[in-house]
């Protein structure tokens, strides 16, 4: 019974890693970014994989083979057949893993961009830096604005 759960969670973790690759996070380690009083925790690929695994487990538990499995007490009759893992449950777990990790990535990126905007607004105006920020990823924009503020 633990093998199907492991396969689903591993599939969700793969989805989280896929999200890390398609976002600007890549394979960065979990870290903290600080600008003044604001600290932003970046989950990195490990956080994306963990959230993807948890999201896949929750989805499979709600809608997959475990949705009608008895957790406490004996059960007989309909719904007591052996639990299996299908290709669709693995594919669904990967998809839910990507979506769950994407949500986390978007929340972190939103906070990075909000902090970058506030930091840049409090800094000396620079046309070159504003052009760099416009074309940068959220993490790069944060670092450009932080550097502007320190100068």
Image (cartoon, rainbow, N blue to C red):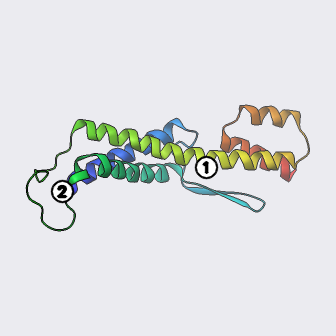
How far from the left and from the top, in percent, is residue 126? Answer: 89, 38
Instruction: State the residue position of label 1.
Output: 108
Residue at (47% x, 53% y) in the render: 46
Q: CA distance from mark 2 to mark 1?
A: 35 Å
Residue at (33% x, 39% y) in the render: 92
Residue, far front? 77
How far from the left and from the top, in percent, is residue 52? Answer: 42, 48
Q: Which quadrant would the N terminus be assigned to in this image?
A: bottom left
User: Looking at the image, which is closer to me, 73 or 13?
Assistant: 73
Residue, far bottom? 73
Residue, far left? 77
Query: Which element carries disc 1, helix, strand or loop?
Result: helix
Residue at (71% x, 44% y) in the render: 113
Residue 102 placement, left or right of 149: left
Residue 36 placement, left or right of 67: right
Please tell me how many numbered marks the rendered image carries.
2
Instruction: State the residue position of label 2.
Output: 1
Query: Which element carries disc 2, helix, strand or loop?
Result: loop
């Amino acid at each position: 019974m633990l093998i199907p759960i492991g396969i689903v969670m591993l599939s969700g973790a793969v989805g989280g890693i896929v999200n890390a690759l398609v976002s600007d996070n890549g394979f960065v380690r979990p870290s903290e970014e600080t600008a003044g009083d604001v600290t932003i925790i970046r989950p990195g690929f490990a956080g994306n994989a963990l959230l993807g695994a948890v999201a896949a487990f929750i989805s499979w538990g709600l809608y997959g083979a475990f949705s009608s499995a008895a957790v406490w007490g004996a059960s007989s009759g309909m719904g007591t057949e052996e639990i299996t893992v299908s290709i669709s449950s693995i594919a669904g777990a990967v998809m839910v893993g990507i979506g769950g990790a994407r949500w986390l990535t978007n929340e972190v990126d939103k906070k990075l961009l909000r902090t970058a905007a506030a930091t840049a607004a409090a800094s000396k105006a620079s046309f070159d830096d504003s052009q760099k920020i416009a074309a940068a990823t959220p993490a790069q924009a944060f670092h450009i604005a932080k550097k502007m503020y320190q100068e």
